[in-house]
């Protein structure tokens, strides 16, 4: 993690040229603030020219690279900062919140996100054979890594393909595979490697997360979840918290509240109906926990978002 008080060191001339080219590519593909899909299905580009406070979101496995500006991401009580010198990797689905600071319309944040399919990691490991990735204790499913020249070059080559659409179908999968390979070979690549290794405890925690994402409305019985992923209850708790900074129950609660917020915004449900849809039986408990996560009761929070 980078200290917010310490500005990033300047890039050398070659890397600065690459960074500027990547920033220009993102700017051309993001006419206004927001996140945009591209012709490469797993690649998204975003522009932010206004500061905003932490906004909870369910993040999926992805590589996040910034060409201009800096972002802050919060996992529970931990802060992760990344900028043009450092990329961020989310290795498992988890509730996060992000913040954009110190930006202007003249110098917006310009970033890209490459979604990671864990099945592609598994296939790459099978094809490449032993990669010499060391086994280590379960770490966070989120980390920041220095953006080395080889990774920056691969990311830039992937983004350049948007200017030659006829090459996307043939070349994009090859460059994406290279990027995944470089992620695995990076100093913290063991985090992705463990998630993709079927017999590892990290992989089993990933399966528990997948189950929770698909069944968050159901009452959570830890014994049943532990049996489903073939772990003891104590190991499930310990490893799950090591990876996500929260317990399975806290994780489920965030999933429920974020889905309820989406239902109220996108489908017009009232608070009690949305709470019931995601598994809450008590409207007062739903409102109390919603306020704790989003900083305001449902009606006030929605009014703020819509304004």
Image (tube, rainbow, N blue to C red):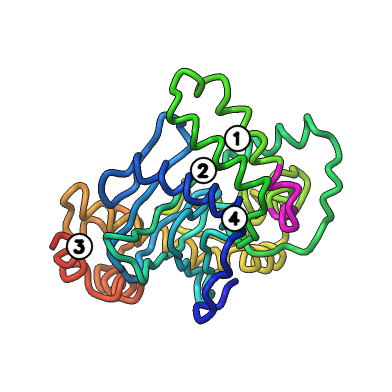
Say which quarter of the image contains residue 157: top right
**Element at badge 2?**
strand
Q: Are marks 1 and 4 in contact (CB under 8 Å)?
A: no
Q: Are marks 1 and 2 in contact (CB under 8 Å)?
A: yes
Say which residue label 4 marks.
Answer: 13
Task: Say if residue 211 shows up in the picture.
Answer: no
Image coordinates for residue 149, horizontal then vertical, percent: 66, 50
Precedes in sequence: disc 1 or disc 4: 4
Q: Are marks 1 and 3 in contact (CB under 8 Å)?
A: no
Q: Nearer the viewer, residue 274 or 179?
A: 179
Distance Cα–Cα, label 1 vs label 3: 35 Å
Precedes in sequence: disc 3 or disc 4: 4
188 within the magenta span: yes
- Other residues around mark 3 within 10 Å, as few (<14) / some (14–19) / many (≥20): few
- Other residues around mark 4 within 10 Å, as few (<14) / some (14–19) / many (≥20): few
Say which quarter of the image contains residue 54: bottom left
- Other residues around mark 2 within 10 Å, as few (<14) / some (14–19) / many (≥20): many
Distance Cα–Cα, label 3 vs label 2: 27 Å
Q: Which residues are magenta?
A: 182-191
**Element at badge 4?**
helix
Q: Residue at x 27, y 60 (%)?
A: 105
Q: Nearer the viewer, mark 1 or mark 3?
A: 1
* Residue 122 higher or lower than 275, as above or below: above
Residue occupying the far bottom of the picture: 5
Say which residue label 2 marks.
Answer: 114
Q: Nearer the viewer, mark 3 or mark 2?
A: 2
Precedes in sequence: disc 1 or disc 2: 2
Say which residue label 3 marks.
Answer: 305
Precedes in sequence: disc 1 or disc 3: 1
């Amino acid at each position: 993690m980078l200290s917010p008080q310490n500005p990033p060191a300047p890039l050398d001339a070659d890397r600065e040229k690459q960074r500027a080219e990547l920033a220009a590519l993102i700017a051309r593909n993001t006419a206004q603030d927001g996140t945009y899909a591209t012709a490469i299905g797993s690649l998204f580009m975003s522009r932010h020219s206004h500061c905003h406070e932490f906004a909870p979101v369910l993040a999926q496995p992805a590589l996040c690279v910034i060409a201009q500006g800096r972002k802050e991401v919060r996992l529970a009580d931990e802060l992760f900062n990344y900028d043009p010198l450092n990329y961020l990797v989310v290795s498992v689905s988890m509730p996060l919140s992000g913040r954009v600071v110190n930006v202007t319309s003249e110098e917006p944040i310009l970033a890209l996100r490459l979604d990671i399919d864990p099945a592609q990691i598994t296939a790459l490991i099978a094809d490449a054979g032993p990669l010499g990735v060391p086994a280590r204790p379960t770490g966070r499913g989120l980390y920041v890594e220095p953006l080395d020249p080889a990774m920056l070059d691969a990311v830039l080559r992937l983004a350049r393909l948007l200017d030659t659409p006829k090459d996307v179908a043939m070349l994009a999968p090859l460059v994406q595979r290279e990027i995944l390979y470089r992620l695995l070979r990076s100093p913290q690549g063991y985090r992705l490697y463990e998630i993709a290794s079927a017999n590892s405890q990290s992989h089993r925690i990933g399966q528990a997360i997948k189950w929770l994402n698909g069944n968050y409305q159901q009452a959570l019985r830890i014994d049943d979840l532990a049996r489903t992923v073939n772990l003891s209850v104590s190991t499930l708790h310990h490893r799950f918290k090591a990876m996500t900074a929260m317990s399975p129950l806290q994780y489920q609660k965030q999933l429920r509240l974020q889905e309820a917020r989406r239902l109220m915004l996108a489908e017009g449900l009232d608070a009690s109906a949305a709470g019931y849809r995601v598994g809450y039986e008590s409207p007062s408990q739903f409102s109390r926990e919603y306020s704790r996560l989003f900083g305001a009761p449902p009606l006030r929070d929605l009014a703020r978002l819509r304004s």
